[in-house]
């Protein structure tokens, strides 16, 4: 029941295929386009981060600590520990009085290759702030501190903030909380399992907060997504798909580990989520470009950014073109 999404050829011969599922919902959360199974259940992974930031922003955390839009954006980030990311995170620590060792996420090296090489050349060591989820953790810690909740158990599924995050996800996704399964993510936080259609619905509402009935939640979603669009590089990193899409003020986008991706379209009032079943991220850009093309998206600047960043040519270590990739799906219309 899955769909062929991308084919890879080398020397004119098929070498790899990537299969998966795609779901597109309208402003009422109805499935309008799909490939594979639109209700296929996925782990949200880091695609949940903009939603995980909502409870704290909704409660007034930004005003309490004087967080800037850049600091709000990095709460929704899977950052690469470039200098701009680390500096923003250190500012958050200074404003909140939290300690880096309060974070549960493991000490890590920067994901950005240049940042990692520079760090190692200077004899630097792993830090918790270098972990790509550290902005999310600092946001939840800051909200816990503001609310008088325990800090040492902030990642536990039973913690008040984690329960509030779960309720918020169910509310935005129009999906019963009791039917959202949970496991543990790579960073130590609860991770959510729900249908692609529910994740797409949540992203439609992030892009169209007028579809959120609760005014405080709508205001928080507007603040978070606006910060993401104003500081797209903080949400991911240089040349990354999240960054390239968020440079377009019409889009709200965030990927997650193991092949899950979601974005919302403001003008078109659509939510889109997809899953590459083998967990690969390399195909995200090509799949997203093809979805936008099939939906008739008219922002040529965005389409051209994606075309430039995600060349279908497959090159070897010397840079020789040795093959190519191509999208292999056609979105079906739901009846």
Image: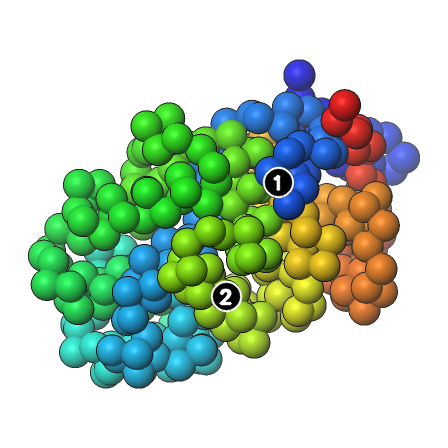
| Residue in view at x 41 percent, y 42 percent | 171
Mark 2 / mark 1, whichever is N-terminal = 1
How many tags in the picture?
2
Q: Position of residue 270 (x, y in %)?
A: 67, 47
| Residue in view at x 32 percent, y 75 percent | 62
Q: Quadrant of residue 252?
A: bottom right
Q: Nearer the viewer, residue 227 or 14?
A: 227
Numbered label attached to residue 39? none
Q: Is residue 182 above or below residue 123?
A: above
Residue under numbered circle 1 = 28
| Residue in view at x 27 percent, y 55 percent | 105
Q: Is residue 85 visible?
A: yes
Q: CA distance from mark 2 to mark 1?
A: 19 Å
Q: How is the image coloured?
A: rainbow
In which quadrant will I find the C terminus?
top right
Tag 1: Cα neighbours inside 10 Å, few (<14), some, or many (≥20)? few
Residue under numbered circle 2 = 222
């Amino acid at each position: 029941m899955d769909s062929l999404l991308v084919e890879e050829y080398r020397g004119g011969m098929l070498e790899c295929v990537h299969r998966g599922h795609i779901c597109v919902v309208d402003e009422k959360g109805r499935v309008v386009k799909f490939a594979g199974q639109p209700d296929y259940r996925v782990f949200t992974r880091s695609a949940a981060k903009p939603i995980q930031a909502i409870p704290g922003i909704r409660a007034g955390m930004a005003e309490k600590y004087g967080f800037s839009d850049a600091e709000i954006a990095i709460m929704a980030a899977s950052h690469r520990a470039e200098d701009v990311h680390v500096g923003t995170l250190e500012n958050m620590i200074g404003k909140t009085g939290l300690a880096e060792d309060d974070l549960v996420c493991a000490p890590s090296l920067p994901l950005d290759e240049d940042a990692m090489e520079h760090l190692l050349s200077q004899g630097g060591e792993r830090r918790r702030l270098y972990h790509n989820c550290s902005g999310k953790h600092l946001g939840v810690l800051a909200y816990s501190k503001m609310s008088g909740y325990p800090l040492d158990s902030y990642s536990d599924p039973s913690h008040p903030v984690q329960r509030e995050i779960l309720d918020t996800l169910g509310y935005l996704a129009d999906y019963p909380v009791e039917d959202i399964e949970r496991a543990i993510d790579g960073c130590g936080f609860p991770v959510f399992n729900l249908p692609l259609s529910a994740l797409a619905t949540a992203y439609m509402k992030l892009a169209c907060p007028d579809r959120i009935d609760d005014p405080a939640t709508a205001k928080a979603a507007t603040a978070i997504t606006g910060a993401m669009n104003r500081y797209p590089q903080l949400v991911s990193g240089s040349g990354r798909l999240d960054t390239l899409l968020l440079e377009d003020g019409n889009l709200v986008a965030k990927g997650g580990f193991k092949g899950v991706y979601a974005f919302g379209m403001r003008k078109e009032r659509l939510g889109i989520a997809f899953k590459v079943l083998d967990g690969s991220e390399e195909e995200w850009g090509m799949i997203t470009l093809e979805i936008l093309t099939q939906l008739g998206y008219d922002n040529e600047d965005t389409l051209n950014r994606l075309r430039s960043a995600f060349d279908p040519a497959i090159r070897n270590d010397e840079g020789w073109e040795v093959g190519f990739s191509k999208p292999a799906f056609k979105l079906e219309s739901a009846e």
